[in-house]
């Protein structure tokens, strides 16, 4: 409004008068949308996960496993201590924050176990995975010793190896 008072011609010249002056509306797939599909009567902004609350339901099994492996590597072995072969991940870094950091990384590790269960891992595999997470979380709370343990134990990498070993024995669909 202030811009219109100071520069009346500029404000009028740059004000769009209709949908033709704005150009086409393109969705993330490159498909042009009609104005009635995005207008006020279109239902507003919403997420559509095809009836599911999980946006990752449409991923293949291999894509889900690859996503879990990438997260496990980020948590446990993403970085290298310069001049050594010691690898650590954000689990070790976030774990430096007393108590809260360990709770956060344990929650992420538990989510990995939940996803393994969703992929069909049997109870004995998920029970061992939960044991690794529990040990990592319990020892991780101890100052300094827990941080070193987080770097050396690598619970998430161990869990992904167990899951991958079980998945490799399963028949392909």
Image (cartoon, rainbow, N blue to C red):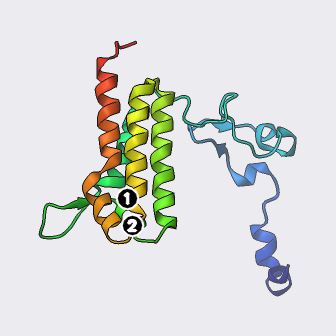
Instruction: Return the residue nearer the eye: 127 or 173.
Output: 127
Tag count: 2
Would you name the residue on which mark 1 appears?
Answer: 139
Q: Position of residue 115 (x, y in %)?
A: 49, 35
Name the residue at 28% across, 27% down.
165
The disc label shown at residue 98, or none: none
Q: Position of residue 50 (x, y in %)?
A: 67, 28
Q: Quadrant of residue 5?
A: bottom right
Q: Is residue 146 above or below residue 70?
A: below
Q: Left of 168 or right of it: where is 49?
A: right
Q: Position of residue 46 (x, y in %)?
A: 74, 43
Which quadrant of the figure contains the N terminus? bottom right
CB atoms of marks 2 and 1 within 8 Å: yes
Would you name the residue on which mark 2 appears?
Answer: 142
Would you say residue 51 is visible in this rendering?
Answer: yes
Q: Left of 163 or right of it: where is 35?
A: right
Q: Position of residue 84 (x, y in %)?
A: 12, 66
Instruction: Return the residue nearer the eye: 140 or 91.
Output: 140
Q: Quadrant of residue 141?
A: bottom left
Name the residue at 48% across, 50% down.
108
């Amino acid at each position: 409004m202030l811009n219109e008072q100071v520069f009346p011609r500029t404000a009028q010249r740059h004000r769009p008068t209709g949908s033709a002056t704005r150009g086409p509306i393109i969705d993330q797939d490159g498909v042009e949308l009609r104005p009635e599909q995005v207008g006020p009567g279109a239902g507003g902004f919403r997420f559509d996960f095809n009836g599911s609350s999980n946006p990752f339901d449409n991923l293949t099994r291999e894509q889900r496993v690859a996503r879990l492996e990438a997260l496990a590597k980020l948590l446990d072995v993403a970085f290298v201590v310069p001049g050594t072969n010691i690898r650590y991940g954000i689990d070790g870094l976030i774990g430096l924050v007393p108590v809260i950091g360990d709770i956060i990384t344990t929650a992420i590790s538990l989510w990995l176990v939940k996803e393994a269960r969703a992929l069909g891992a049997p109870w004995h595999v998920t029970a061992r995975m939960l044991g690794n997470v529990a040990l990592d979380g319990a020892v991780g709370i101890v100052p300094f010793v827990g941080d070193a343990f987080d770097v050396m134990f690598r619970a998430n990498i161990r869990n992904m190896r167990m899951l991958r070993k079980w998945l490799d024995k399963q028949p392909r669909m």
